Amino acid sequence: MRRVRYESTGGPLFLEEAPVPDPGPGELLVRAEAIGVTLPVVRKVTEAAEPIQLGGEIAGEVVAVGQGATGFRVGERVTGLCFGHGYADFAVLHEVMASPVPDTASAVDAVALVRSGLVALGALDAARPEPGEAALITAAASGVGHLAVQLAKARGAGRVVGAVSDPAKGDFVHALGADEVIIYDALGSVEPVDFVLDAVGGELLTPAVAALVPGGRLVAYSSGGGTIRAYDLLVGAKSVIGFQMARIARGRPELYERWRRELWRLFAEGALKPFVHGEFGLAEAAKAHEVIESRGNLGKVVLRP
């Protein structure tokens, strides 16, 4: 089979031939039909001290089942998060991370919706929104952000502000249902909001906290780091909540499953639509990473083996 790999930090991605892996206990071997490209993986390629296995969201058909895996059968379509080599024709997926793909959805729909949607919905739940509250969503045109905008509206937000890096993304974010779209440099002038879902971090954290009403909440789920001054929280009785999807998947599987069901329900009802910026072949993985690195994507970036 073909597999994408690299040999040094920031080094070029290349295709290699590799043996088809065998699923271990509790694992599924999946013939990949679509692979989601994420910012955390792209960052690890350029920043991690040692090369990593390129994992991520995958969707496809189960072709083999490991010992003790009883939740799925050969021939069923699944999607989930692969922690090993995911940029490949075949990938191993632990069954606890897998979920079925409905007949009405494509593999591309699945990788654009499920993992990014789980992060968006989880971050939204962490903010404890009340009906009618105002929300600010950073990286609003991203794979997670464009779903968070739609979910905030579906959950009853009275006003949703989408923050983006480039004004050219404005029409796209408005079409998702955002009431306002601003660029990051204009965060200081935004009318205050009740909660912020932040996927950017870094220097954006300070103006994002300043955009909160007294008692407002910021949910941080970015891999971009950053620092917040305690005084900025104290004077407005504001709070910051860290959200990590892996913790929910490992520790609260019932909540994880409930969120998955809600995503597919909203998708079936037409209330949640994943958008795909572009589809790339495995040999074009470097181009897909460039789109993410440049923050040029509108929606999800997908590899199609």
Image (tube, rainbow, N blue to C red):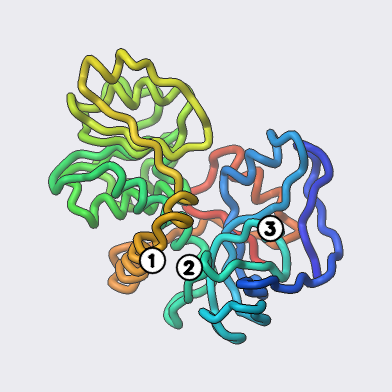
User: In the rendered image, which residue does mark 2 sit on?
Assistant: 109
Residue 240, horizontal then vertical, whole percent = 33, 30
User: Looking at this view, is 150 or 235 the one in front?
Assistant: 235
Where 65 falls versus 38 (above or below)? Answer: below
Mark 1 or 2, nearer chain start:
2
SS type, badge 1: helix
Left or right, 296 with reference to 207: right
Give the CA separation, mark 2 to mark 3.
Answer: 22 Å
Q: Provide residue 187's location: percent of width, then percent of height.
A: 33, 25
Q: Which SS class for mark 2?
A: helix
Q: In this view, does 19 lie to the left or right of 27?
A: right
- The amino acid sitting under disc 2 is Asp
Report the side of 163 relative to 30 (left or right).
left
Q: Is residue 181 among what the camera can see? A: no
Residue highlighted by disc 3: 84
Q: Residue 79 carries which label?
A: none
